[in-house]
Image (cartoon, rainbow, N blue to C red):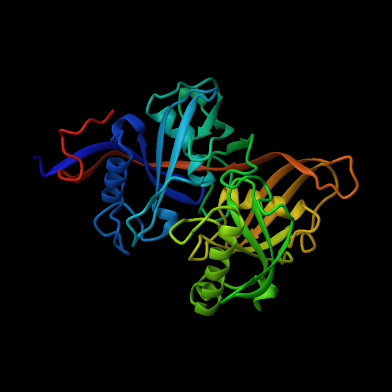
Amino acid sequence: MPAQRAIPCLFMRGGTSRGPFFRRDDLPADAAARDRVLLAVMGSPDARQIDGLGGAHPLTSKVGIVSRGDAGAELDFLFAQLQPASDTVDVTANCGNMLAAVVPFALETGLVAPRGDTSTFRVRTLNTDMTCDITVETPGGRVRYDGAARIDGVPGTASPIAINFLDTAGSVCAGLLPTGHTADEVHVAGAGALRVTCIDNGMPMVVIRAADLGRTGGETVAALDADTELKARLEALRLFCGRLMGLGDVAKKAYPKMCLVAAPAHGGSIATRCFIPHVCHDAIGVLAAVTVGTACVLPGSVAHGLAVLPPGAVKPVSVEHPTGEFTVELGLEFGLGDGEPPSVTRAALLRTARLIMRGEVMVPGQVWPASEEST
């Protein structure tokens, strides 16, 4: 048995996340074997991930797996969320940030070919069967990474990547509002009595007013991560709401995310502090921003009364987060009945991505013996 096995990969940043990307055919076909390989690649379980590519944080413990698509999509994307100190590999939820790197990866590896100065491809996220159209700049037949687009949470500027989500409602839950209500009054041991909005428009999320937890919603990430009393209350609430949302026992799952909201403080639409789910996000995830933005436009939600929104059926929602803001453009369709909430028919946003490294990642030979098939 060889001491190590080499696996081709590209190490990429997608939005405010990063991690290795693989062609599906370069990994084991068996899910258990694949997960064993991914744990070795990232260096989990180990809080420092010192023996792998992981960055000792959930935002840098992510993996993308890409293949040619079918069922109407040109590319299929499987997202895997790992945790530094855990041996779990979660493929049940989406990641909109890593999604931004899918088309650049596919172009770099020859899975698809450029289509002119800009190239648009339909991508299906296998985790939840969600589809979107992704447009990247490809002047001269090459992926462009430099440009003037800026996203908060990433230094410098880069080429814009436009993502237009086609079907995000009920990505993991049974529907947009899995409890059937825009808000629920819950009484949770260890968390108290709270009013929450349970929602899933791309990411299962529990939205809570920061003031209801005795916080301002403007705290620093470091302060919130050190707030053990708040984190204990949020986890008790998360476990309770997970069952309320039809997700069962979520103790070992990366969702639902927990989002504290407050009135905007810097000219945006809403202020947020998101937990993913046990540490505070330095920014906010793509689909978390879509989901909390959706909560903002639903009358009766805990976010609606706090949000500052423009009139009209197309609403740019500026979601403030600890390192800046994230604008999501929502298209609304208003119902005919009195009191009927609007439907979100479109969610569009801008991200950036960059190829950081190309090569091979090495895993111990016993993790993936040469005798095992890769396809």
Task: Classify residue 345 as left or right of residue 27.
Answer: right
Q: Residue at x 26, y 50 (%)?
A: 40
* Quadrant of the snapshot with the N terminus: top left
Q: Where is residue 273? Give x, y as percent.
A: 60, 65
Residue at the far right: name it.
Answer: 338
Q: Where is residue 25? Give x, y as percent.
A: 32, 29
Front-most of 372 and 80?
372
Task: Classify residue 206 as left or right of residue 32.
Answer: right
Q: Residue at x 54, y 20 (%)?
A: 116
Numbered label tally:
0
Q: Where is residue 346? Give x, y as percent.
A: 70, 38
Q: Where is residue 170? Give x, y as percent.
A: 62, 44
Task: Classify residue 63 as left or right of residue 133.
Answer: left
Q: Is residue 220 depicted above or below 352 in this figure?
A: below
Q: Quadrant of residue 209?
A: bottom right
* Quadrant of the snapshot with the C terminus: top left
Q: Residue at x 15, y 34 (%)?
A: 370
Front-most of 202 and 123?
202
Q: Residue at x 66, y 79 (%)?
A: 214
Task: Classify residue 341 as left or right of residue 260.
Answer: right
Front-most of 65 and 207?
207
